[in-house]
Amino acid sequence: MTQSQPQVRASVRSPRQSAGQSSGGSTEHGPGPGLSAGNSEVGPRQSSDRSSGQSDDRSPGHSSDRNPGNGPGSDSGHDSGRSSGPAPARGRRGQATAWREARALAARAGRGAAPRTQRLSLDGTLGHVLAEPLAALTDLPSFDTSAMDGWVVAGPGPWALGRSEGGSGELGILAGHGAPAPLPDGEGVRIATGARIPANATAVIRSEHAHVDETRGLLYAQRQVVPGQDIRPRGQECRSGDQLLPAGTLVTPAVLGLSAAAGYDELVTVPRPRVDVLVLGDELLTGGLPHDGLIRDALGPMIGPWLRALGAEVSAPRRLGDDAEALQHALTTSDADLVITTGGTAAGPVDHVHPVLAKIGAGLLVDGVAVRPGHPMLLARLPSGGPYLVGLPGNPLAAVSGLLTLAEPLLRGLAGRAPEEPFRVVVRDEVHGHPHDTRLVPVVHRVGSAKGSGSPGGDGAGAGVEHVVPLHYNGPAMLRGIAAADGLAVVPPGGVRSGTEVEILDLPWASATPWTEGCFT
């Protein structure tokens, strides 16, 4: 039964039992006719009862969900979506939260946090979010200005060549000077782009559209002159007091420019959420090749940059191993807004997240999500107004699923940013689904012909239209698919046919522009 409100559960309960299997994947550029539904990959510390390709990211009593390394496996990369029989009974934790409800609950939790603001100089606000509307402090432009280099004229032509009164001589009226003298009727004076328009002026004639008869001292227009042409009138863009941008707007380079033009030296913004990252597991190496049962930590190097790309300030990862006391100390002393843990969310002998949360009196908002991969993820609130905690499964792609399902909407709310509008696009090729759970499948965006089986003519996505192509290597312990992806397709239970529109979760660097602090291309 899904939660309709972000209610805190009274206590942390034991993990639920495994129920079902994850769905079939696709080949690296689409599955083709012989799409396999099985996942032959078996990572370290995975459940021994994963028959028929059962997904390892949700097995009870094993630490496969907490293993942040890329476990060895075959190249099939198919995350099985075929259930070989009735799902086992769920454990005491009850039913997992539906994927969409889990995301909505995380977003509500973020938006419900106590608001905080800070005042920063303009050069320190890039990538932050406006805490209050941006209202113009002046008219833009604040006086009538010339939109072009040329001649400012008064009345009908031809015009006698005049001289500026601002000490610039034959240079005419330049930008950055005070108000020029009124322009007599029948005269024309050189003027630079951005310079103030003198009183009584009719229009500006571009340099290339004018001819000067030096002998007679007259200026001629080579095209028709329209009153007001190439003059930017005062207040053309806005009047003082106009709202330029609403609260919640991300401060981009363009916003910085607009703010400066509108008269601001500082902006009131929402502080970036502060995040601590705790990497759990004794089996993890920080360098070199795997050996003697030890594996490389894939999540430690990945989580921090990912969270920064989401707009957070992230501390250096802390590697706690499988130490319950160290985990408890880290949680109870954190002054961050959010704590991310990797691994340890199942019920193995060294999976300490649930027991420690219970011991310190944390409340669970989400305890398992009906999504593949990554269903053992959790969202909790530490006691006494402490930070939120997002517990990620240890398998890498399962952890990515947790980031996009819980951490991203939570951080967006904490940062004061509005929820993203859902984006849907046609998927090329059939994508198998889990019988009961949502699947998140790595995809790449393409534009062009997308032949498939979604229409009687066999043209699933159509020619010349945007579509996405499912990627291979989408098992819960794999990163090869997501490393090549632009986003994750949200595949409903039962799967989708070629030519079906699916929701897309863009990866932060796929949709971000290069200026964004913390993002990369």
Image: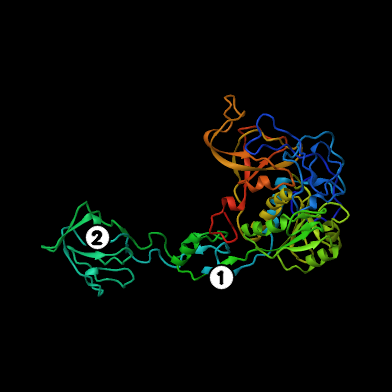
Q: Position of residue 339 (x, y in %)?
A: 73, 61
The disc at residue 202 is 2
User: What amino acid is found at the position of numbered circle 1 in the picture?
Assistant: Leu
Q: Nearer the viewer, mark 1 or mark 2?
A: 1
Q: CA distance from mark 1 to mark 2?
A: 43 Å
Q: Quadrant of residue 441?
A: top right
Q: Dot 1: within a 10 Å radius of its alpha carbon, few (fewer than 14), some, or many (20 or more) residues?
A: some
How does the figure colour the protein chain or chains? rainbow
> Left or right: where does residue 85 sit relative to residue 465?
right
> Which residue in the rendered view is the most extreme toward the left?
216
Where's residue 267, x and y in %? 53, 68
Instruction: Tell me the residue that label 1 is attached to.
Output: 120
- Which label number is shown at residue 309? none
Q: Residue at x 64, y 61 (%)?
A: 312
Q: What SS does tag 2 mark?
A: loop
Q: Is residue 428 left or right of residue 238?
A: right
Q: How far from the left and from the top, in percent, is residue 181?
A: 24, 71
Q: Residue at x 62, y 44 (%)?
A: 504
Is residue 206 in sight in this rendering?
A: no
Disc 1 and disc 2 in contact, CB within 8 angstroms? no
